[in-house]
Amino acid sequence: MTGLDTEIVAGGPPTLSVGEETLEELLATHRESVLEEWLAAQIAMPGHRSDLLDDRVLRSESAEFLDLLQEGARGGKNGTIDAPSWDRARDFLSDLSRSRASAGFTPSETAAFVLSLKEPLFARLAEDPSRDTRSVLRASAAMSRVFDGLALLTSEQFQRGRESVIARQQREMIELSTPVVSLWDGVLALPLIGTLDSERTQVVMESLLERIVETGSMIAIIDITGVPTVDTSVAQHLLKTVAAARLMGADCIISGIRPQIAQTIVHLGLTLGEVTTKATMAGAISVALELSGQMIVPRPT
Amino acid sequence: MSREINERIPVLKLGDILLVTIQVDMHDQLALTLQNELTEKIVETQAHGVVIDISGLEVVDSFIGRMLSNLASMARVLDAETVVCGMQPAVAITLVELGLSLPGIRTALNAEQGIALLQGHPAAPVEARGHAPAAP
């Protein structure tokens, strides 16, 4: 194995293109037989999902991929699939992995689409009488590299698809956890629960500001009873929200500051500026009512 | 080019308050024209307050933010108080992210509240602070 590797490396730049050149040549001369064998291999594979994938679709996908592969090999001559000529092949594979991922294929089943093409191609290579063992080995190793790159690409895309799902769920969770409550005529409350990071602050800020416009509220109470810790960045985020609300013409009151949090704020040397703060939501409500010129009085008996 | 020169932002006089309604996206030349016109109008009418309604403004950059700040400072020098009103949420977020929280400028949700604020109306939140709550 080591001998072979050294051989390729020692050959320098010209051998880097061996993979593409062989690939192009093989696809040009044996396209039909390779396609048939590849299809047969894909269908025979233990992981083949005839329940999810129609044979005709598979055939057209495979044929298209062979064309794109040929196109990529024609333009790229450096042993990787980074060259612009591979763009379409990579896009095709990305789309394929995405659609297969959403159809319920596993990453290895998706990667097998590319990897199963190796065998028919290597077989053609070995059958070629003009090649000696050395050149067959060299060409197949170089071709392998291209295929490995493509197979990795499918896994990567698969993972990316999963990650986008996770990100979407995260976003939904953020939205669910930041309700803006209309507390009184002209008074909004925003009970924050959980840690504030910059992304969440953005959502909180947006939903608060939108509700301020919708309801025409002049006062917003931000309740941080449910925020476990307040550090400099959380305080920064809170102040940003308050500043944005102020720019729109609404006053903010921060309430629900627990004794522990008050101590932390002072120890960290944070200043909440000119923001009105109250220990409890009840205190904040009475301030809000006072600010908006309203009051609650006991009913006369 | 000629279109830009013809474009103007009207400055309306309402009692001793000037009302500026920005309904188009500001560009630099327009901002400078407004600065000139507003200061001249304040001097001319002896206005005590300026209400700048920016509800139509959807895009801001640091230049516009600074311009608002400058307008308020200029008005203050000429003894007129400025209230910026009707800021869109997206605009408010952008300004905060740019670090331009416009300190010293008073704000209101809409032009009506802005005018009430300048006239010292009891319903105005900042004015009411520290005073006895007004009768409902």
Image: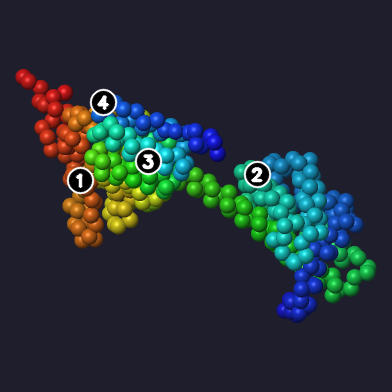
How would you rate the neighbour count of disc 3 (Cα within 10 Å): few for under 14, some for 14-19, many for 20 or more? some
Q: CA distance from mark 2 to mark 4?
A: 66 Å
Residue closest to the far left? A301
Whether discs 3 and 2 lie on one chain: the answer is no
Q: Quadrant of residue A192?
A: top left
Quarter holding the N terminus of chain B is: top right
Q: Residue at x 10, y 22 (%)?
A: A299
- Which badge, 4 or 3, is on the more N-terminal residue? 4
Q: Residues within 10 Å of mark 2 (few under 14, many from 20)?
A: some
Q: Is residue B112 visible?
A: yes
Q: Quadrant of residue A85?
A: bottom right
Residue name at image x 33 percent, y 37 percent: B40
Q: Chain of mark 2?
A: A
1 vs 2, front mark: 1
Identify the residue position indicated by label 3 in the image: B35
Q: Is residue A299 above or below residue A242?
A: above
Q: Which is closer to the viewer, label 2 or label 4?
A: 4
Q: CA distance from mark 1 to mark 3?
A: 37 Å
Q: Is residue B18 above or below residue B79?
A: above
Marks 3 and 2, how far apart at CA = 56 Å
Give the left or right position of residue A243, taking residue A169 as reference. left
Q: Are marks 3 and 2 in contact (CB under 8 Å)?
A: no
**Mark 1 vs mark 2: which is more N-terminal?**
2
Q: Secondary structure at mark 2?
A: helix
Residue at the spot of label 1: A277
Residue that numbered label 2 is attached to: A99
Q: How is the image coloured?
A: rainbow
Q: Amino acid at mark 4?
A: Gly
Circles 1 and 2 on the same subunit: yes
Residue A65 relative to residue B94: left or right: right
